[in-house]
Image: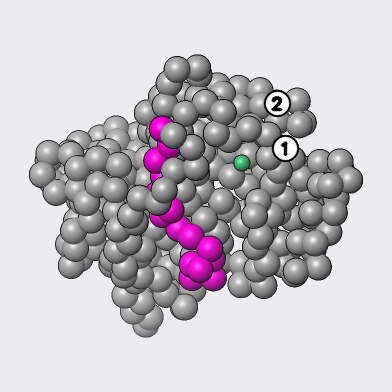
Amino acid sequence: MNTPEPMFVRELARIDDPQFVSGQVAGHRARRLIDAPDAVFADPFVLMAEDWSPPGLFGFHPHRGIETVTFVIEGAIEHRDSAGHEGVIQAGDAQWMTAGRGIRHEENPPAGTIAHTLQLWVNLPAAEKMADPRYQDLVASALPVRSEDGVEVRVFSGAYGGMVSPTLNHLPVTMFEVRAENSIAFRHSFAATDNAFVYVLEGAVEIGAAGNLLKASQLGWLTRSEEPGSSELIIAARGTVGRFLLFAGQPLREPIAFEGPFVMNTQAEIQHAFADYRAGHF
Ligand code: CO
C-alpha cells in the first residue's frame, strides 16, 4: 500500500521591506520591490516597481523579451503602444502586455492626477522572446472571482478552485488578488516547484503553518521545493483585513542578460535589441 506523500507546506522564506528611491521627476515617488540583483533568485520574475507617477514620466519607451504586468492601486493609467493598442485601466484593474520581439509604449495617468501602480516584469522563455507583441486589459469586474466565508479571490491569471482566468499566458503565471477578513484563511494548492511571492496591499497577513507576519508594503518570498508535487499555501488575515497579491511561476533556469528595458539570454542579443531599436524596428 502506498501512503500519500506529505504535502509541502509553503512558509515565509524572506521578507523584503523596500525603501523609497529618489524619483525621476518632481512629484514622482518609487520603490523597487524586485530589482536586477534578484533576477536569478526571482526567476521567472525579473523586476517589480511601485510608482506614484505624474503624467509624462513614462513617455514612449521600448521593451523586448518580457511581459509587463501593471496593476493599478490608486488612480488610472492611459496606455498607448506602437502596435496600435490603446486603453485605460482604473484602480483594481491590470494590464498584461507581451513585449515579445519589441514594442514601444507609454503609460500615463490622466492630466492633473498621480497614479499609484505596481509593475512586474515576467521573463519570457528563450523560445518565445521574439513572440508577437500582445496587449490584454484585465478589468477587475470582468475577471473570475470567488467570495466565500470572508475570503475573496480575483483570478487575474491562472486557475483557482475550478475558475480559470481568460488571460493568455506565454509562461503560465498565477496572479490572484485576495482579500481576507477577520483572521479567515485563504488556501491554495499549486506546484511545489513554482517560485512564489506575496505583496501586501492593505492590513497584514499570517503566512504558512508558522503564521509568520507580513505587513502592508512588504513583499514576502515563499519557500519552495525542488521535488515535483503539490504545495499547500495558507494565508490568514491578521485582524480585520489582509489584502494581497499572490504571484507564482515556474523558474525558467535560463541565462539572463538584462539591460535597460530589454531582458534577453545573452549580451549579444541585448546589443542586437539596441541596434534594432536605433534602426526603428520596434
Ligand atoms: Co514600459
Q: Quadrant of the N terminus?
A: bottom left
Dot in front, 2 or 1: 1
- Amino acid bearing label 1: Arg
Give the residue displayed 81% in from the left and 41% down from the top.
Answer: 282
Distance from the alpha carbon under mark 2 to that under mark 1: 11 Å
Q: x%, y% of residue 217?
A: 29, 48
Callout 1: SS = strand
Q: Is residue 214 visible?
A: yes
Using the image, determine if residue 76 lies above or below residue 250. Answer: above
Q: Amino acid at mark 2?
A: His
Residue extending farthest to the bottom is: 1
Q: Residue at x 74, y 55 (%)?
A: 129
Does the stretch in magenta take in 259? no
Q: Position of residue 252 (x, y in %)?
A: 61, 67
Q: Please name the residue shown 41% across and 32% down the image.
A: 27
The answer, for residue 155, to whether it is visible in the render is no
Is the CB–ligand 1 distance for label 1 below 8 Å? Answer: no
Q: Nearer the viewer, residue 201 or 137?
A: 201
Query: Which contiguous range is marked in magenta?
Result: 27-41
Mark 1 nearby-residue class (10 Å; few <14, some 14–19, many ≥20): some
**Residue reaching furthest to the top:** 111
**Residue 34 is a magenta residue:** yes
Q: Residue 28 sits in which quadrant?
A: top left
Neighbours of disc 2 within 10 Å: few (<14), some (14-19), many (20+): few
The label shown at residue 85 is 2
Ligand 1 is found in the corner quadrant, namely top right
**What residue would you read off at disc 1?**
104
